[in-house]
Image: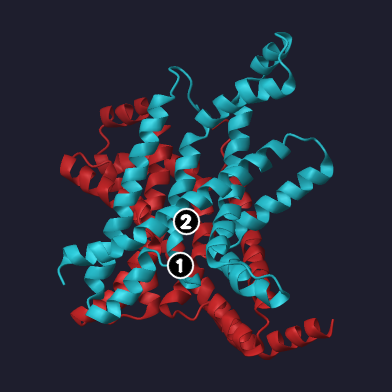
Amino acid sequence: MTGMNAFIHDLIAYSPQILTGLKNTMLLMGIISVTGFFGGIAVFYLTLSSRKTCRIITEKYISFFIGTPLLVHLFLMYYGLPELGVRISPLTVSVIGFTLNVSAYNARYLMTAFHGLDRMELEAARAEGFTPLEIFCLIILPQTLRRAVPSLTNQVIQNLKDTSVAFLIQYNDFFSQIQEVASTNFEFFKAYVTAGLVYLALVSVIVVLSRRLEKRIALPGF
Amino acid sequence: MTFWQILQVLATGAGFTILVTAASMSAGLLIGLAAAMLSRIRWKPVQHLLVAFTFVFRGIPVLVLLFIVFFGLPSIGIRVPPFLSMVLTLGLISGAYLAEIFRGAMNSVNLDEILAAEAMGMTRAQGFLYIMLPQMFRFSIPGMINEFTSVLKYTPFAYTVGIPEIMKQAMSLTPMIMRGLEVYLAVGIIYFVIYKLCLMCFTALEKRYRIPGLSAD
C-alpha cells in the first residue's frame, strides 16, 4: 500500500499541472462541440441545396472526413503547413481539424433524422408561401435536431475521448500531463488507469446531462 | 521524389494497417458476439458484469487504453507485444460497441420464429444458430460497417507502439524529404482508398446475402 500512497502523493504534488491539463482538455472539448454543432447544421443545410454540384461536393466532403483518420488531418496541418510558412498553435490546429471532422459526423446524423421527416409538411409549408430558408429554419431544423439529440450528445462524448489525440501534436491536455507524472515516477500502470478513470467519470457526467436534455425536449407523442 | 514515389513508400505500410484493422475487427466481432450472447442470460451478476464492460470500454479513449496495455501492464509484470496490444485495445473497444449493435439486432428478430423452430423439434442451439444468427447478422450490417470504419481510423495510433504501418512510414519519411504536406496528403489518400475499397466489399457482400423484404427497420 505504500506504493499507492506514494503515487497519490505524486498526483497531489503535480496537481496544478494536471488541473491545467484538465482545463485544456475541457476547453478543447467545449470549443469543438460548439463549432462542430453549428458546422454540422451548415453542412446539413448544404446537403439539401437545390444545386446538384453543391450537393455532390458536400457529400464528398462528408465521405472524406468520415473515411480518413483525424490524426492525419491534424498531422497534415501541424507538420505540413509550416512548409508554406503557416505556423499555427496546437490548439488552433486541433480546433480546425476537429471542427471539420465533427461537422461531417453531425451533418450525417442530421441527414438520418431528416429522412424520418414527413415530406407532406415540407410541401404544405411551400404551398403556404414559406421561403426555402424559412422552411429550413422553422420546419426542418427543429424536428431533425430533436430527433438527432441522442446521436449529437454521443458525438460530444466522442469529442471528449478524441481530445486525447491532441497530445500527439504537443497540445498540453490532461493525458499529456498524466504522462509527465508517469515519466517522473515510472508508475505507468497507475498513472494511465487514473487517466482512464477520470475520462470515465467525465463521460458519466455528460451521459447524465444528455439524459436530462433528452427528457426536457421530448414532446409527448412525437 | 515525386508524389507517386511518396505514395509507393507509404503503401508499404498499408499491409500492416490492413492487418491491424482485420485482426482488431475479428477480435471485436468475437468479443461483441460473446457479450451479446451472454446478455441473453438472465442472471444478475452476468448482467452487471456486461453493463460494466460496455461502460468501461465505450467510455475510455482508445489512446488511453492502448497506453494502459502497452506501457502500463509491463510495470506490473505483464509484457504485451505491440501488435497484440493494438489488437487487444481495438478489439475490446469495438467489441463493446458491437455487443450493443448485436443486442439491438437480436431484439429485432421475431421471437415467434424461434418458437416455431422449437415447435418443429429444433433444439435451442439449432434455433439460435439457424434462425437467430443469420437474421441478426443481416440486421447489424449498418452498425458493423460504422464500427469497422472507426477501427480503421484508429489504426494510426499503432505508430505510438512502434508498428510500421502507414503513419509510422510517413513520420520517418517526412524529416528525410522535408515535404510533410505532400506526405500527409498521400497518407489521407491511401486511407481513403482503403476505406472505399472495404466499403465496396461490404456492399457487395451485403447484396449477395440480402433477403428481399428483410431489413433492419
Query: Mark 1 — residue?
Result: B163
Judging from the image, mark 2 belongs to the subunit labelled B
Q: Which mark is residue B27?
A: none
Give the x, y percent position of residue B212: 43, 17
Q: Crowding at label 2, few (<14), some or many (≥20) Cα neighbours within 10 Å?
A: many
Q: Colour of chain A?
A: red
Residue B105, quarter of picture? top right
Q: Quick one: quadrant of the N terminus of chain A?
A: bottom right
Q: Colour of chain B?
A: cyan
Tell which of B105 and A131 is nearer to you: B105
Judging from the image, mark 1 belongs to the subunit labelled B
- At mark 2, the secondary structure is helix
Q: Is residue B12 above or below residue B211?
A: below
Mark 2 and mark 1 in contact (Cβ < 8 Å)? Answer: yes
For the point 35% across and 49% down, which residue is it? B195
Q: Is residue B48 left or right of residue A46?
A: right
